[in-house]
Image (cartoon, rainbow, N blue to C red):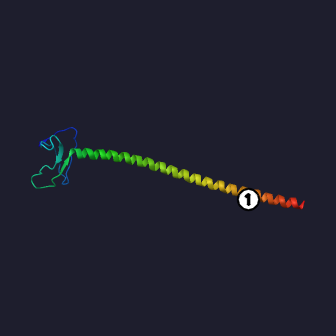
Amino acid sequence: MRSSSSSSHPRRMLCKCGEEVLLLTSTTVANPGKTFWRFPRWNSGAGCNFFRWCEEEVQNAGNHEVQKRYELEIADLELKVSKLKRKLHEERVFRRLITVVLIVSWAMIIGLCIFFSVNCVRA
């Protein structure tokens, strides 16, 4: 396996031990040309033996982008739900107001009918 200076992976990466890991390219038959991150002293028995294929890193970055899109979509939907709840509340208040106005108007009509029917009978 040889070291790689690929510009597609310019950042440094640290392992769990806090050491900088190496970016290498596989020369094995099973994974020819596949890049990976590896603990610098992997065969010494010391340290954490960190290993990660670079494709996993790209996959995780892609998942991060998908997650970000979902978070934005969720925020947009939450805003829409909030607006709909506010509109529903306003509609309920308006319905109650109309109900009160109708009850009061019917009471006034009945009151006027009773008033005039009593006065008409006396006259």
Looking at the image, residue 73 sits to the left or right of residue 28; the answer is right
Residue 3 or residue 25, whichever sits in front: 25
Circle 1 SS class? helix
Looking at the image, residue 118 sits to the left or right of residue 42; the answer is right
Eyeballing the image, is 34 above or below 16? above
Residue at the extreme left = 44
Residue at the extreme top = 7
- Residue at 87 percent of width and 61 percent of height: 121
- Which quadrant, please, contains the N terminus? top left
Q: Position of residue 17 (x, y in %)?
A: 18, 54
Eyeballing the image, is 90 above or below 5? below
Eyeballing the image, is 28 above or below 44? above
- Residue at 34 percent of width and 48 percent of height: 67
Q: Position of residue 82 (x, y in %)?
A: 49, 51
Q: Toward which corner of the image does residue 59 lie, by quadrant?
A: top left
Q: Which residue is mark 1?
A: 107
Looking at the image, residue 83 sits to the left or right of residue 111; the answer is left
- Which quadrant, please, contains the C terminus? bottom right
Marks counted in the figure total 1
- Residue at 44 percent of width and 47 percent of height: 76
Give the residue type at disc 1. Answer: Ala
Q: Position of residue 56 (x, y in %)?
A: 24, 46
Looking at the image, residue 27 sits to the left or right of residue 87; the answer is left
Q: Position of residue 74 (x, y in %)?
A: 41, 49
Residue at the extreme right = 123
- Residue at 24 percent of width and 46 percent of height: 57
Label 1 Cα neighbours within 10 Å, binned few <14 / some 14-19 / many ≥20: few
Residue 59 or residue 37, whichever sits in front: 59
